[in-house]
Amino acid sequence: MSFREIAITVRAVNRASLEFTRIQTDAEALNARIKSLGAAIAGLGATGTAIGHIASQFGLLNAEQARVFNSAMMVITVMGMFMRTSWGVALANKVYAAACWVATAAQNALNVSYAGWLALTGVGIAVIVAAAAAMWYFASQMNAATASVQSFNEATAETPGRARSITRAGEEELYRRGVE
């Protein structure tokens, strides 16, 4: 391995290391956000539990309603506390990765359908242009034929009558046979 190849390899590793560092920083930021969200959810659940107890004491909720409400709030608190653990963060990352996969699949499907629409639209426009070109060519050929017939008729009209009455030998016989 030459010194140049080693230098290229070192540069490639350094560039890749920077990207890996950026990915690690993004992952750590996501983990911090997940833990922060877990703390907020746990706080919301704890606040809900306290509100349930106060509502029960003031008679806004009966004992059964307060028990159900407080149980639901405790479940929310436990979920928030679980999100703060490493297992909770790992689970949240897996859910996030699955959601990203679904979003990517949906975006790819939209891109494919849009590309198909563009291709079909392009083919449709090409067919319309081809049909218009064919109609233009046909019309120009018909115009040329019409002009030719008109010039023949003009030339015939200018020809004296005696020149037009000249017949070839045997032509009268052909006309007579056609009538019989």
Image (spheres, helix red, strand yellow):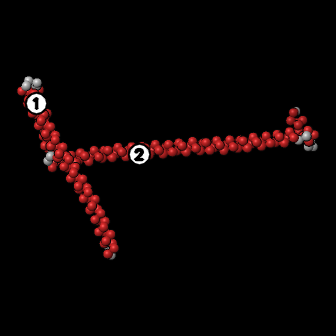
Name which of mark 2 and mark 1 comes first in the sequence.
1
Residue at position x 74%, y 42% from top?
145
Tell me residue 64's x, y (percent): 9, 26
Which image quadrant is residue 76 in?
Answer: top left
Tell me residue 65's x, y (percent): 11, 26
Asked if residue 52 lies left or right of residue 161, the reply is left
Q: Secondary structure at mark 2?
A: helix
Quadrant (top left, top right, bottom left, bottom right) of the C terminus:
top right
Residue at position x 66%, y 44% from top?
137
Point out the residue furthest to the left here.
Answer: 57
Label placed on residue 52: 1
In front: label 2 or label 1: 1
Residue at position x 83%, y 40% from top?
154
Q: Amino acid at mark 2?
A: Val
Quadrant (top left, top right, bottom left, bottom right) of the N terminus:
bottom left
Image vertical order of residue 63 relative to residue 160, above or below: above
Tell me residue 21's x, y (percent): 24, 59
- Give the Cα separation between the discs numbered 2 and 1: 51 Å
Asked if residue 110 lies left or right of residue 155, the reply is left
Residue at position x 86%, y 39% from top?
157
Pointer 2: what residue?
112
Image vertical order of residue 18 relative to residue 63, above or below: below
Q: Secondary structure at mark 1?
A: helix
Label placed on residue 7: none
Which image quadrant is residue 73 in?
Answer: top left
Is residue 165 in view from this perspective? no
Asked if residue 10 lies left or right of residue 46, the reply is right
Q: Amino acid at mark 1?
A: Gly
Within 10 Å of the Cα at label 2, are there few (<14), some (14-19), or many (20+) other Cα atoms? few
Asked if residue 62 lies left or right of residue 167, the reply is left
